[in-house]
Amino acid sequence: MSLNVYWAMAFILPKGVIRAVEKRMRQFLWKGNSAVGYPKVAWSDVCRPMEEGGLGIRDILALNKALMSRHLWNVIQSNQSSIWVQWIAHTHLRHKSVWTVDEGWLLGLEKTSSPTISTSSLH
């Protein structure tokens, strides 16, 4: 499993992170080790499956959405064999349906009593 697939499977990736990773992928593909190079094909064409004329490189945003949808599917199905599903059920759902719970926890907007680190202080 590649590193970007692991992180896409574990977290909802911020769009800035996705753009930065794809930028580096494009630079490597078009420039390699040299400082000169330009795109020969649109990135959306490169991300197509090989059977459709692409290079089979995965679109990270689509991959992240698909993997997060799988997590949501496991929650809906109450797949209790998953530790992640058990944690979500205990921490966020608390015997509620996934359809009726406030979506703030999913987006990281939930108010907590514990201190948090601001991402602006990391720049």
Image (spheres, rainbow, N blue to C red):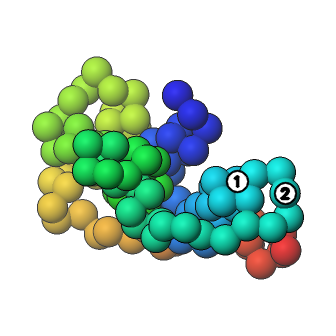
Is residue 35 found left or right of 5 in the rendered image? right
Residue found at x 70% / y 54%: 28
Report how far apart the C-alphas of labels 2 and 1 lie in the structure: 9 Å
| Residue annotated with mark 1 | 28
Which of 3/108 is in front? 3
For badge 1, the amino acid type reads Phe
Q: Give the secondary structure at mark 1.
A: helix
Is residue 78 found left or right of 64 in the rendered image? left
For badge 2, the amino acid type reads Ser
Which of 102/95 is in front? 102
Residue lying farthest to the top in this orientation: 81
Which mark is nearer the camera, 2 or 1? Answer: 2
Question: Mark 1 packing: few (<14 Cα in 10 Å), some, or many (20+)?
Answer: few
How far from the left and from the top, in percent, is residue 122?
A: 83, 69
Is residue 41 visible to us here?
yes
| Residue annotated with mark 2 | 34
- Identify the image quadrant of residue 89: top left
Q: Please say if 102 is above or below 3.
A: below
Residue found at x 15% / y 61%: 99
Q: Please say if 58 is above or below 19.
A: above
Q: Of the residues under marks 2 and 1, which one precedes in the sequence?
A: 1
- Identify the image quadrant of residue 70: top left
How far from the left and from the top, in percent, is residue 37?
A: 73, 67
**Quadrant (top left, top right, bottom left, bottom right) of the C terminus:** bottom right
How far from the left and from the top, in percent, is residue 6?
A: 53, 37
Is residue 21 visible to us here?
no
